Amino acid sequence: MLGNLGSWIRDFTEDTSSAPPDDGDWARTLAGLLVEAAMADGSLDDHEKAQISDALQADLHMSASDVESIIESAVAAQDGRIEIHGLTRSIRAETDAEDRIAIMEMAWMVVLADGELHEYEAQLMRRLAGLLYVEDIDSGRAQKRARARLDAR
C-alpha cells in the first residue's frame, strides 16, 4: 500500500510523485501512533503537536485543516485507548520493514521534539520497536537521524 515510504521520508524529497496515496485511514492510524508517542510522558505539548502536524502535512501531503482535525480525533481516541496493538498491527500489515523504520523515525522526532526524552517515552519507543518488528539497532539509527533532523532546524 505505501510503497517506498521509508526511503521517501529519509530522502527529504520535494518530489510528490513518489508519495504514498492519500489514505485517510492510514493518516488516522499514523496520527494515532504519533499522538501515543507524544503523550507517553503524560502531555501533548506544542512542540510535539507541531511535529505531528509537520509529519502529516509534509510527509503525507495533507492540508493544515485536515491535519488539525485528524490530530484532534487522535487525541480524543487516545484518551479511550487502552493499548496500541491495534495501531501497530495495522501498520505491520500494510508496510514493509523499511517503512516501519521510517515510522519509528517519525515517532522519535515526536518524542524528542520537546528537547527531552522522558523515561516513559523511552520505554514506549522500545515497546513500539518490538510491536513493529523493528530491530533495536534500526530503532537506534532512527533515533540518531531524528535527532539530526531536529538539530538541523
Image (tube, helix red, strand yellow):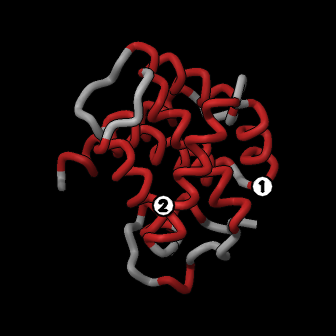
Residue at 75 percent across and 44 percent down: it is: 92
Secondary element at tag 1:
helix
Instruction: Tell me the distance, in whole angstroms, between the alpha carbons under discs 1 and 2.
Output: 24 Å
Residue at 42 percent across and 69 percent down: it is: 58
The picture places residue 89, in percent across and down from the top left corner, at 79, 39
Residue toward you, 151 or 76: 76
Residue sticking out furthest to the top: 119
Disc with the residue nearer the chain's start (1 vs 2): 2
In the picture of the structure, the residue carrying the numbered disc 1 is 94
Left of 128 or right of it: where is 61? Answer: left
**Vertical side of 126 occupied by 135: above or below:** below
Residue toward you, 83 or 147: 83
Secondary element at tag 2:
helix
Mark 1 surroundings: few (<14), some (14-19) or many (≥20) residues within 10 A: some
**Vertical side of 96 occupied by 3: above or below:** below
**Vertical side of 149 occupied by 142: above or below:** above
Give the amino acid type for the residue marked by disc 2 in the picture.
Glu
For the image, the number of numbered tags is: 2
Mark 2 surroundings: few (<14), some (14-19) or many (≥20) residues within 10 A: some
